[in-house]
Image (cartoon, helix red, strand yellow):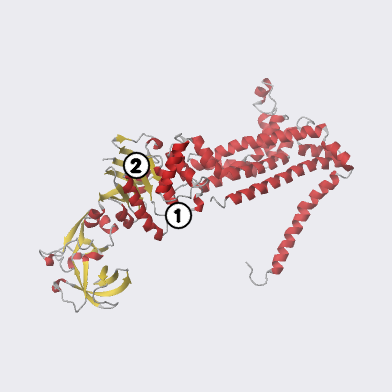
Amino acid sequence: MYVELKDINKHFGDFQAAKNVGFSIEQGALAALLGPSGSGKTTILRMIAGLEHPDSGDIFIDGVRVNNVEPSRRFIGFVFQNYALFRYMTVFDNIAFGLSVKKERPEAIKERVRSLISLIGMEGLDNRYPAQLSGGQRQRVAFARALAPNPRLLLLDEPFAAIDAKVRRELRAWLRDMITKLGLTSIFVTHDQDEAIEVADQIIVTNQGRVEQMGSPMALYKEPASPFVAQFIGNSTIIKNFGRLKGFEGAPPEAEGAIRPEFLRIYTQNDTIQYQTSTEEAVVERLAFRGDSLEVGLRLKDLSLSASYSLEKKPISVGETVRVLIYRLYAFDGDQASLLHNHHLGAHPQGYSYII
Amino acid sequence: MSTGNDRPLRLLLIIISVLFILLMLVTPLVVILVEAFRSGLEAYTKAVTDPYALKALKLTGLATVAAVVLNTAFGLAAAWAITRFSFRGKGLLTTFIDIPFAVSPIIAGLVFILTFGRLSYLHPFLAAHELKVVFATPGIILATVFVTLPFVAREIIPVLEARGTDEEQAAALMGAGFLTIFRRITFPHIRWALLYSVILCAARAMGEFGAVSVVSGHLRGKTNTLPLHVEILYNEYQFTAAFAVSSVLVAAAIFILVARNIVEFTARKESDYVR
């Protein structure tokens, strides 16, 4: 394992920002630290960089314990949330800074900076100051500046937070491609689950200073191990006493779970339904056009559920009564979460594959 | 801004401002110049080049330079410490910096008399080493430094606070040392504020009267600064000479005002391409 954290604890006064945090990341991986604000993800990133020091626990990079290694000797590239570009330096000088403090030859610096500027597609802008750049361009410069000294690990703190939504999508793809191309082990912090799922190979979900779960985006999505992850990833609705729903009878009344839009299937009253007796009646409360599909807000007994509905199917309208089949849900048991299938469907549970 | 008929109000406010400035600032300045040249250019030149006047000018210059240098060094150190580190007593330090603004200069002068004068516990030690502080140049410098102490720190602290520490952290992560960070990252942010505060500090140091008056002892040619010299001349009914020497201070003040405006203008122009 290239980056490894073991039993990290960190307090800021009474606030515990990290509780027995441990995880490891393979060389060349692009990992996301995902969690709500205040979950300790930025603190973890800053501890890896050496900008904060853990109260206890060990941090290893490339097999070497780095707790007592100076931040500048850890050979890490760090992209700050607001980029922290040097405002009084041009694009060129910003990127060259890390090399010039290492006293590299001016020609070598020039060459390296030129190649980075062309890598980020900003030829001709080397004499601009950061204030003269767009948000996306600033992020690219911050990225190039972090890469210039050839770090062995790249850390990015909320790299897309300061960018407007439209450019953010492009930049995600750009950054992903760039990091994959370079094969550089990278960790980025985000509070946005879509971002983590889209960009990362590996996601570490943090909550209240703890690591809740880690794994591939697919694994987290399909097999959330805790109620928190089931709620945080995907668009889930929490359901109390799911034993009253058809197909899940027999669950104790205190049983709690979560349902995602893709766990539901909507039929109109005229549709022929294979599992007619397993369906619930629901009323369409709200319809929102999502481009390729409709997002349907449903009232099912006392529950407000969200489902998606293909535009290819018979049109439905607000106020209409429909039939809903619940394929599966996440059942919570203390800190654990597990997938529960509708037992009426018997030996033919619908595969997950067609959903994703 | 214009909401309906606000012209009378605008006119009124402008008239009040202009009249006040004319009455309170312009008239006295004109009087100084008129009085200074009342007895002709020759008398003016004589008063200004009088050996005692020149010595006073020299002492004022020395005290000003000392105040600027010491307070710049202190101001930078204090501003850096306060904005970049957290330590016990930080709030107290910040409050203490303001004391010279709150305390009357006369009291500041008296404090130095009590600390270094004949009644002080330090006096035997100072006397044994033939160190004269009060009624000597060191006392003048101390008093001037005291009254101008807050200028640089007060000007720099908000700038550093607003800039945050991200850029410095980024530079440190890349292996830059303290001096490189200060020279290449921090200093460009504060240079105009620093220059501005140095100018204000110099202006205040040149004009200081109260504190210096107390520690000076008014030894002509020895411990007289320009403002004190003016007072002596005035008390001796040498009005032309008093106003002539005053005009030197006025000229210095105008020079400083112009310098300040240039600094402000340049800083604003620069902020167009760096924010």
Closer to the camera in the image, B5 or A181? A181
For this orientation, the residue located farthest to the top is B128
Please, which chain is the residue tagged with disc 2 on? A
Q: Look at the numbered discs 2 and 1 and tell me whether their residues touch, using CB distance below 8 Å.
A: no
| Above or below, comparing residue A165 to residue B179 in the picture | below
Which secondary structure, mark 2? strand
- Where disc 1 sits, the SS reads helix
Residue A165 position within the rendered picture, expressed as x and y whole percent measured from the top left: 40, 60
Density class for disc 1 (Cα within 10 Å; few <14, some 14-19, many ≥20) is: some
Which numbered disc flags the more N-terminal residue, 2 or 1?
Answer: 1
Q: Nearer the viewer, residue A22 or A86?
A: A86
The amino acid type found where label 2 is placed reads Leu
Label 2 to label 1, Cα distance in Å?
A: 24 Å
Q: Which disc, if any, is residue B90?
A: none
Amino acid identity at mark 1: Gly
Quadrant of res B213: top right
Label tally: 2
Locate residue A136, reporting x and y percent.
Answer: 43, 54
In the image, which disc is placed on residue A135?
1
Q: Which residue is mark 2?
A: A153
Q: Is residue A272 visible?
A: yes
Q: Are dots 2 and 1 on a single chain?
A: yes
